[in-house]
Amino acid sequence: MFFNMKSFLKITLLLVLSSVVTSIVSCKKDEVKPNDGKPVIYYIRSTNPEVSDSLLVGTFMGSLIAIVGENLADTKEIWFNDQSATLNPSYITNKTILVNVPSTVPSTVTSKIRMVFGDGSELLHDFSINIPAPVISGIKSEYVPDGNIVVLYGDFFFEPKVTFPEDLEAEIVSLTKTELQVKVPVGATTGNITVRTNFGTARSSFIFRDNRNVLLDYDGKNHETWTAPIVNGPLPAPCAGNYAFFKHAADGAWMWTNELTMQYWAPRGRGNVPVATGNVSDLVLKFETNVPIEWRDVRMEIFFAGFAEDHGRDAPGTVFARWKPWKAGPYKTDGWVTITIPLTEFKYGKDDADDNENGTTSISNLNSLTNITMMLFGPAAGPNPVQIAVDNVRIVQK
């Protein structure tokens, strides 16, 4: 629920004015003073001006609500189920209280608001807190060996049960509201991950160990072996068997060396088969990477080319993506992570300036593109050591 600050200030001013007017009238008429009568709740409403005329019988955790009634000024505590709300005395008047519903999941659900007053008396009011179903927004790495840790990102991970394909239940290792770490069960296969709580079920949009349209896995689908060497650890430890390892003690500007390129030529691979089919705007390039030391400079160029025993970098019309994860500072991963690059990010010509963020071209036709190259090549401030592991290069639907 979104909240407009200007509207909030207007509401607060009206509440204060209402309190002042009430106090003046009470003094003049010598009538009932605040809290001389029993506290009562007339209704609860949203503070969002767009729906403020709608009365609430429940809301979501974290929502800001207005409790409207009489004799509320001596309120000391407000409980939603068994969770205590934080009160701001500035937002408590005789007739109205503004309060945020706690964001902590209750252990005991009473579906009531319990208000405690200065004299120890209490007031109960029926009100439900709607706890959302879990949400899975991402995964650290889509490829993780059996027995290792998968990290899931999302929200509302409240006492979850996590299952892998074939309904294999995972052991939970670490848990917060927005991050979930589980151990991959033995025998896990390719498919979606499911998170269930008492409040709903979420199924991942990504595919664990995604095996769709894998161009290179370095176990059976290999690149030109005289380029970036294929290794199997020990450092970094593999995520799915062999991987390509870009490694150099002092990578500098425009260094074209075999160990810093990874070239796949379709005539020596799967033949004259496009790297992908479909609309460019619907597709992404994915791969797993592990960067064990800080990568500080030199972009990684990624590009496709036609059916030939050649990298195709200098061919007319070649379109590049420029992967520069170090732009905001030195880049280093904590183990393997999945990288996603939309094919719409393939938008640079060979001679586009390094500071040109918009590019001058795009991929117009995937049908004629069969080769793929990844290479560290570009300007640099100076030489730096580099180590970049890459595995499971694939092009899939978003």
Image: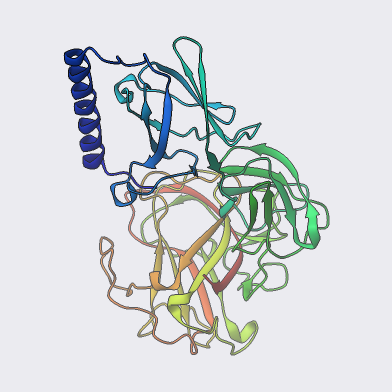
Q: In this view, does 385 lie to the left or right of 322?
A: right
Res 139 visible: no
Residue sticking out furthest to the top: 119
| Up-down relation of residue 260 to residue 57 (above or below) | below
For the rendered model, the colour scheme is rainbow
Give residue 275's position: percent from left, percent from top: 55, 81
The one of 331 and 52 positioned closer to us in this rendering: 52
Res 16 visible: yes
Give residue 371's position: percent from left, percent from top: 53, 80
Give residue 304's position: percent from left, percent from top: 47, 78
| Up-down relation of residue 124 to residue 155 (above or below) | above
Q: In this view, does 60 lie to the left or right of 174?
A: left
Give residue 90's position: percent from left, percent from top: 29, 22
Task: Tally the numbered discs.
Answer: 0
The one of 111 and 278 positioned closer to us in this rendering: 111
Where is residue 182, by image quadrant? Answer: top right
The one of 218 and 325 positioned closer to us in this rendering: 325
Which residue is found at the position 32% from the left and 44% from the top?
Answer: 3
Which residue is found at the position 50% from the left and 82% from the top?
Answer: 310
Q: Is residue 152 left or right of residue 191?
A: left
Residue sticking out furthest to the right: 187
